[in-house]
């Protein structure tokens, strides 16, 4: 192998590692934003909610860094096949993680508008962080799957999305029932429904990332795998 070619391969490998590290950093910030938004919701901590909104800029900045590096790698290295899928996946995943951070920010924006008072309403609020924890774990696990190019782990994340949807449906029914029985809480419950929907969307985005990870690792689409396994 020529020294120049060997150097190019090493440089490319280093850049891929850097892309993975940046996305891991983004993921960590997004997970923290979700956790902090839930803490702010439970405690009605408007200061913490404000911090979540402010820190979203850090996620945006890393996404921009990923975009620059990915474009540079594609332009200079002209990667093929597996390598190109890795770079494109990193570029797409960064965009999805940025949107996950936006959902956490949107939840934080609702905190000042929700004034929990009364045992039943506090009980309703206390269930939502458990749903957020489930969604956050999906985000964490799918980004681990991306870092290790683990297609099977990506499949397992997809399989958990239906449980999150069921959780959302349960919370939706509980909140709507409470709102009907307590008409004065319409505005507050509407905000809580918005929060729950944002968490459900975080899970959807984690599933989208899982599909990207599966494609990057295998070169096949997850939907095609499902069709093959069912024989349809």
Image (cartoon, rainbow, N blue to C red):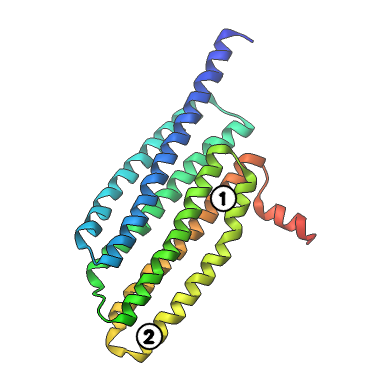
Q: Earlier in the sequence, mark 1 or mark 2?
A: 2
Task: Name the residue at the left extreme.
Answer: 47
> Which numbered marker is on residue 178?
2
- As drawn, is 70 to the left or to the right of 39? right
Q: Position of residue 79 (x, y in %)?
A: 57, 28
In which image quadrant can residue 130 be found? Answer: bottom left
Residue 32: tell me if it is visible. yes
Q: In the structure shown, which secondary structural element does the residue marked by tag 1 occupy?
A: helix
Picture layout, residue 191 above or below residue 80: below
Quarter of the picture holding the N terminus: top right
Q: In the structure shown, which secondary structural element does the residue marked by tag 2 occupy?
A: helix
**Disc 1 from disc 2: Cα separation:** 35 Å
Picture layout, residue 118 above or below residue 67: below
Q: Position of residue 73 (x, y in %)?
A: 48, 28
Please state which of the two labelled residues, at mark 1 or mark 2, is closer to the viewer: 2
> Which numbered marker is on residue 132?
none
How many neighbours does mark 1 have within 10 angstroms: few (below 14), some (14-19), or many (20 or more)? many
Identify the residue at image location x=45%, y=50%: 96
Q: Position of residue 188 (x, y in %)?
A: 29, 78
Q: Position of residue 88 (x, y in %)?
A: 53, 39
Given residues 22 and 148, the one toward you in this image is: 148
Tag 1 near tag 2, CB within 8 Å: no
Identify the residue at image location x=36%, y=56%: 35
Given residues 44 and 176, the one toward you in this image is: 44
- The residue that label 1 is drawn on is 210
In which image quadrant can residue 24 be found? Answer: top left
Given residues 83 and 156, the one toward you in this image is: 156
Task: Name the residue at the right extreme.
Answer: 231
């Amino acid at each position: 192998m020529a020294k120049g070619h060997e150097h190019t391969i090493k440089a490319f490998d280093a850049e891929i590692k850097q892309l993975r590290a940046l996305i891991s950093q983004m993921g960590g910030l997004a997970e923290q934003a979700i956790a902090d938004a839930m803490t702010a919701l439970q405690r009605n901590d408007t200061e913490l909610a404000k911090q979540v909104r402010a820190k979203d800029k850090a996620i945006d900045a890393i996404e921009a860094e990923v975009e620059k590096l990915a474009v540079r790698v594609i332009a200079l290295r002209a990667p093929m096949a597996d390598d190109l899928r890795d770079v494109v996946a990193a570029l797409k995943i960064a965009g999805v993680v940025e949107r996950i951070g936006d959902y956490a920010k949107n939840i934080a924006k609702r905190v000042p508008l929700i004034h929990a008072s009364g045992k039943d309403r506090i009980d309703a609020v206390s269930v939502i962080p458990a749903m957020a924890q489930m969604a956050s774990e999906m985000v964490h696990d799918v980004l681990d799957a991306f870092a290790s190019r683990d297609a099977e782990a990506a499949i397992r994340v997809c399989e958990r999305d239906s449980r999150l949807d069921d959780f959302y449906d349960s919370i939706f029914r509980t909140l709507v029932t409470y709102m009907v029985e307590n008409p004065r809480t319409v505005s507050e419950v509407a905000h809580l429904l918005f929060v729950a929907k944002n968490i459900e969307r975080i899970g959807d985005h984690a599933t989208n990332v899982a599909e990207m990870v599966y494609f990057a690792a295998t070169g096949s689409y997850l939907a095609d795998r499902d069709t093959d396994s069912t024989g349809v």
